[in-house]
Amino acid sequence: MSDPVSAIGTRARETVLRTASDLFYREGVRAVGMDMIVDRSGVAKTTIYRHFPTKDALIEAFLEREDCEFWQQWHEVVAPHTGEPRRALSALCDWVGGRVSRDGYRGCPQINVAAEFADVGHPARKVAHRHKADMVEKLATLCRELDIATAELRANQIGLLFDGAFMSNGRLNELDTPDVLKDAVSRLIRE
């Protein structure tokens, strides 16, 4: 039998995290105060601080959640193309192109939040740094499967290309974004 108090606490934590995530993404983390999160979530401030002792802890949880969702989607995209790195990279280009073309898309949450903090030791910067390093490593794995001599360099270049798309602010919407990305990636991996 589940503990009803624990279930209520879990629901409250999820409500706060979902509300804060939406606000942080739309408004930026510095523009969102804890009182706004209390007002929008309907969860008492004491309950919020029980789950997230500081605003920085809540920001870190937001980025960790975004990170998990991102990698879950990434794996769903590449899984059908195991052993076919060119097709996996092409599928990633389609996926990234679709992400950046969504209504209300405001850029990569990791990059957006990291840009708000100058301190490289801030939890947000650490999560963002790890996220981007993981992306380059996953891309390097695909490039090594292609037997490219410069796999790490190409992975970093593709990572920069994807990050540029993530931060394009709608500039690519007039183009076929997946095709733009696929063309650039195919030029990078041609050896």
Image: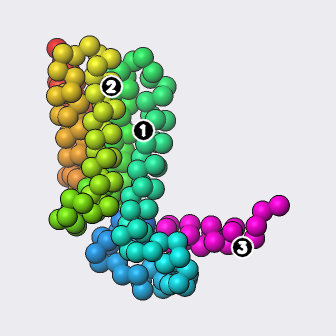
Q: Is residue 125 above or below residue 30?
A: above
Residue 5 within the segment the image draws in magenta: yes
Give SS at disc 2: helix
x, y percent for residue 93: 32, 35
Q: As shown in the figure, which amino acid type bears the numbered disc 1?
A: Trp
Give SS at disc 1: helix
Q: As shown in the figure, which amino acid type bears the numbered disc 3?
A: Val
Residue tagged by mark 3?
5
Q: Are marks 3 and 1 in contact (CB under 8 Å)?
A: no
Query: Does the image show residue 77?
Result: yes
Residue at x 45% of width, y 56% of height: 65
Whole-angstrom CA distance, mark 2 to mark 3, is 45 Å
* Residue span colored magenta: 1-18
Q: Are marks 2 and 1 in contact (CB under 8 Å)?
A: no
Along the viewing direction, whichever of 6 and 139 lies nearer the viewer: 6
Q: As shown in the figure, which amino acid type bears the numbered disc 2?
A: Thr
Residue tagged by mark 2?
141
Whole-angstrom CA distance, mark 3 to mark 1, is 35 Å
How dense is the environment of label 2, judged by Cα within 10 Å: few (below 14), some, or many (20 and up)? some
Task: Say whether disc 2 or disc 3 marks the residue closer to the N-terminus.
Answer: 3
Give SS at disc 3: helix
Q: Nearer the viewer, mark 2 or mark 1?
A: 2
Residue at x 42% of width, y 55% of height: 64
Task: Say whether disc 3 or disc 1 marks the residue closer to the N-terminus.
Answer: 3
Tell me the number on the disc at residue 122.
none
Residue at x 75% of width, y 70% of height: 4
Residue tagged by mark 1?
74
